Image (tube, coloured by chain):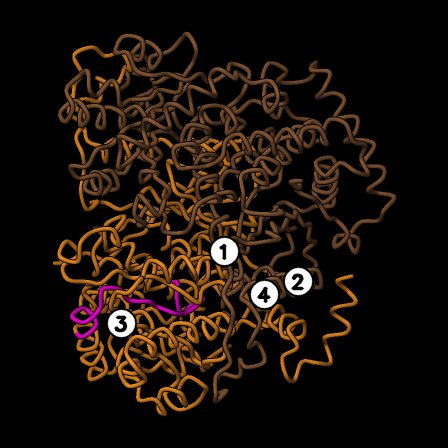
Chain colours: A brown, B orange
Amino acid sequence: MNKTVSFDYKPALEFVEQREIDRMGEIVSHSKEELLTREGLGKDFLGWIDLPVDYDKEELERIKEAAKTIRDDSEVFVVIGIGGSYLGARAAIEFLTPSFNNQLTKEQRGGAPEVYFAGKDISGSYLNDLIRIIGDRDFSVNVISKSGTTTEPAIAFRIFKKMLEKKYGPEGAAKRIYATTDKARGALRSMADEEGYTTFVIPDDVGGRFSVLTPVGLLPIAVAGGDVDALLEGAAAQRKISLDKDFDENPSLQYAALRNLFLREGKVMEVLVDYEPSLHNLAEWWKQLYGESEGKDGRGLFPASYDLSTDLHSLGQFIQDGTRIMFETVLNVENPPSDVTIDEEPVDIDGINYLSGKTFDFVNKNAMHGTRLAHTDGQVPNLIVNIPQQDAFSLGSLFYFFEFAVGVSGYTLGINPFDQPGVEAYKRNMFGLLGKPGYEDLTEDLKKRLQ
Amino acid sequence: MNKTVSFDYKPALEFVEQREIDRMGEIVSHSKEELLTREGLGKDFLGWIDLPVDYDKEELERIKEAAKTIRDDSEVFVVIGIGGSYLGARAAIEFLTPSFNNQLTKEQRGGAPEVYFAGKDISGSYLNDLIRIIGDRDFSVNVISKSGTTTEPAIAFRIFKKMLEKKYGPEGAAKRIYATTDKARGALRSMADEEGYTTFVIPDDVGGRFSVLTPVGLLPIAVAGGDVDALLEGAAAQRKISLDKDFDENPSLQYAALRNLFLREGKVMEVLVDYEPSLHNLAEWWKQLYGESEGKDGRGLFPASYDLSTDLHSLGQFIQDGTRIMFETVLNVENPPSDVTIDEEPVDIDGINYLSGKTFDFVNKNAMHGTRLAHTDGQVPNLIVNIPQQDAFSLGSLFYFFEFAVGVSGYTLGINPFDQPGVEAYKRNMFGLLGKPGYEDLTEDLKKRLQ
């Protein structure tokens, strides 16, 4: 049977007493009830809770069909989206596929096209570089936007739409554009209906940062060859634990409790730590989930991440001995996808022969254990999330573990974990400076401030 | 004439008064004198100060020759190093070359091989993925390590050395191994002398995080096609400003002053912000330079980074409205390598026609200006570093700007900016757990703590 993720807070018991944890356990259990009664803050955005069991089965079949078509007719697949319409799919694909995956042959990728992300920034040179990579090869586009008017994906989509039309004609282009958007409203929905794009729905009650298990994440993941059924099964298995289990057996509740304890004790930053490069973008997904859910009303733990052991050779000094502001949550992949054995050398000039016959993962795990103890000694508490495998089931479990925990944690913090009012501030200013219709009143004042 | 970087602290004047800056200007000017008299803390590691003008010219020629050989005889170039033996070259190559550079043809890269980094982590699956990418193609290796015994690069080097020997025989392998190491001592020096590798010297008086303008950075940068002469010229031009100019005209001094003012006012984190994906690894280089130099004795600003506008859609909420702990230093590329114009659409469904005829960079710059004002309103002070071009001269100027500033800033903070005692803690524990000879005494106690 597939295993779900597990959570271990024993390493933190040097910093918090069990009775504090028990007391916080009562508080987060109350937050869990508040979440599940669906009467709390942001209650219109709780669709993610039941998503792994209560999704549109017919739509999932359509996703798989679309993925099959794209895999058959495309060498390149461009995913256009930003924030929650980008980070989950990217995290999943990098977690599930080898490093340098786009440089393998299509056959080595099991038939998947190369997958690239666009509309995630406003760099013209990045866009030109990507266009050069596509060249004259067959490609398809998945544009992901609830409204269709978010600037970054909208301007990128204009470019790729034109490229497709030039290459395949208007009708051919429309067959290669997959729009993931609102079911009824918005610019992208209108355009999709008018042009006849294949469409998938972003549910009204699921916010962007909770949308990886909707078509937002599922289509790109399926195109890349990810097992979306196993992904949903893993999430469903974790959901059962999150909903049914008491604090003592509930990883999400325990994680929510510990991070709130550290916050109350004065920590201002949580660092998500990985020991596999392929988990880098999982941490980026987590940063949005936690930063955007909790970073409001002047509160919240700042979410940072390290790739170790790499960053021990850059940030290790600060972690060990700099300003004492952080705790760490370590992602431990129990069984990595592959491993390498260290050979014996006839002459042991580098002094590494004591490791001969051992594997890289053996060294990596001991680096992890040693680092945990060193950071503990440096007054940086450690929590551990154990991930059984780098497979879709484990990933689904992990996604849900973090999602449920942030809902509980946000309620415990006393904020609405399901809104993001602060995201609008830069957009308003940008629109004012760009002279967007409706924002002209802001322009003069903003330009004056810039002088 | 080529322009050096410039620094603009005007946006921060809402948070600090000019008289505070003037007062801090006196303090950092004193720190500068302390640095230049070479009598302060860490005085044995100040070789970087004169490096751009006082380097081994003969060695630079040898670097260029080696780069030419590697470009001629290799499809792939593997750079093995970690920390300061990794981050500078990676930052420079990504700054100077297009995105997806390894996916272009050798001809499109101007004759450069694909460049990959290894020995920067302990992931066996990353290593296997990289080995698969190399395949049976011709490759060379640059192993970079002062001692030759740092675990991460040492175990990776064993693997690639064996691969080279299998493919080219022992002598052929030795011709394809370039060792950047100590001039006289250490395991890698011994091995190189014994096997006859081409070697380059890591100067004794330049610490790892200051080594990008030594052969550590210069060889990989030259192999990738970077103009190392222009890089050094840019650094030399910036050095002249750093050494000769008074506070009012000295960007490094001003930057050191402002960040120390913010630290004293209670900020605990500095975020380096970029608006071009190709600057991502420059921020990683900066994180080591600042985190490792200042994060000690329980002090220092935690160095973080964002790629914008990407991360405005994930961390933007926190920045705007979460815990108030940070200030931002924005990297502004004044003239990006290329740009894309937004076309008019006959029907303006997405409401973007107001931007038709405008370029991505125009939008990007206004996102930057709008964000700066929004974050200022959210009580996050902004500083700006203007980078004239994404070219080698600008980059050399930028490297030196940050290096000089961190020396001054560290002295102002009252710590030794040139040591890194905290980096050893995890290594000791790892060695104990791995049973490394000489560390057996630690093993039992560590294993007990892990139970």
Q: What amino acid is at disc 2?
A: His
Q: Chain of mark 1?
A: B
How many angstroms separate mark 3 from mark 1 (CA)?
Answer: 35 Å
Q: Return the residue at label 3.
A: B219
Q: Which residue type does callout 1 highlight? A: Asn
Q: Judge whether residue B83 is colored magenta.
A: yes
Q: Mark 4 or mark 3, which is nearer to you?
A: 3
Q: Are marks 2 and 3 on the same chain?
A: no
Q: Which residues are magenta?
A: B69-87
Decide: marks 1, 4 in contact (CB < 8 A)? no
| One can see residue B407 in this view | no
Q: Which residue is mark 2?
A: A369
The answer to whether mark 4 and mark 3 are in CB contact below 8 A is no
Q: Position of residue B365 (x, y in %)?
A: 28, 35
Which circle marks residue A331 in the picture? none
Residue of label 4: B296
Crowding near the residue tagged with mark 2, few <14, some 14–19, many ≥20 C-alpha atoms within 10 Å: some
User: A313 or A88, which lies in front?
Assistant: A88
- Residue sitting at x 27%, y 14%: B351
- Determine whether B37 is above or below B139 in the image: below
Name the secondary structure under disc 2: helix
Residue contact at pointers 2 and 1, CB within 8 angstroms: no
Of tags 1 and 4, which is closer to the observer? 4
Q: Quadrant of residue A400?
A: top right
Q: Quadrant of the C terminus of chain A?
A: top left
Residue B260 marker: 1
Q: Chain of mark 2?
A: A
Residue at the location (74% across, 45% down)? A265
